[in-house]
Amino acid sequence: MNRFSALLIPLVLFFGGLPPAFAEQLQIGNTAPTFQAKTHDGGEFDLNSRRGNGWTVLYFYPKAGTPGCTAQACAFRDAIQAIRQQGAEVYGLSTDSVAELAKFHREHKLGFTLLSDPDASVTEAYGAKMPVLTMAKRWTFIIDPELKVRRIDNDVDPALDAQKVAAALKQLQGKP
């Protein structure tokens, strides 16, 4: 491990659990902060386009290509049909560049859209920004068709997140 990693990892672990200093805490029932972002293929995404078009799963992750983020993305890849059967679409969001996201998407054959937030403005609006670092915490939001936040998970296990989301969507929609 190099010196930078030896210093960075404890800082991330320490600061990663603290609440954001300047973002108002998003609550269940709040309207989701709307935003526009570049997709992994260079296109444009606007959360407003999801209004009336099913449920939205928005998961934030720190860094494409790292072990936890890869496990989480691959778990969503493998569960995407079960999630779509619940009338939901998945979007993974990080502060990585479009080029980094395109590579990550291609390498892992992801069947859902990744979003780039290089200045962390979206990440901050959702309260998921790590203090000091321009990186996202690993948080997952479920947003209903009217863009209301219906679930916030700020204690995400990357390998189990997709399964938890599929189950939560059934529960939120009153399905057995």
Image (cartoon, helix red, strand yellow):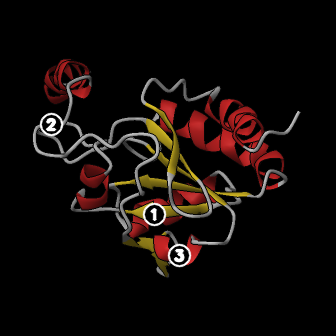
Three-letter amino acid code at the position of disc 2: Pro
Residue at the far right in the pictured view: 176
User: Dot 3: within a 10 Å radius of its alpha carbon, few (fewer than 14), some, or many (20 or more) residues?
Assistant: some
Give me the residue at 24% from left, 50% from top. 124
Say which quarter of the image contains residue 66.
top left
Comparing 148 with 93, the one in front is 148
Tag shown at residue 115: 1
Three-letter amino acid code at the position of disc 1: Leu
Left or right: 114 as drawn, with respect to 129 = right
Which sits earlier in the primary sequence, circle 1 or circle 3? 3
Q: Position of residue 35 (x, y in %)?
A: 36, 69
**Count of numbered tags:** 3
Q: Position of residue 116 (x, y in %)?
A: 39, 64
Tag shown at residue 131: 2
Disc 3: which residue: 41
User: Dot 2: within a 10 Å radius of its alpha carbon, few (fewer than 14), some, or many (20 or more) residues?
Assistant: many
Say which quarter of the image contains residue 115.
bottom left
- Kindly state the secondary structure of the residue where label 1 is placed: strand
Comparing 66 with 19, the one in front is 19
The label nearer to you, 3 versus 2, is 2
Left or right: 53 as drawn, with respect to 63 = right
Q: Position of residue 7 (x, y in %)?
A: 13, 22
In the depicted structure, whether residue 65 falls above or below residue 43: above
The image quadrant where one finds the C terminus is: top right
The image quadrant where one finds the N terminus is: top left
Give me the residue at 50% from left, 30% from top. 68
User: Dot 1: within a 10 Å radius of its alpha carbon, few (fewer than 14), some, or many (20 or more) residues?
Assistant: many
- Kindly state the secondary structure of the residue where label 2 is placed: loop
The label nearer to you, 1 versus 3, is 1
Which sits earlier in the primary sequence, circle 1 or circle 2? 1
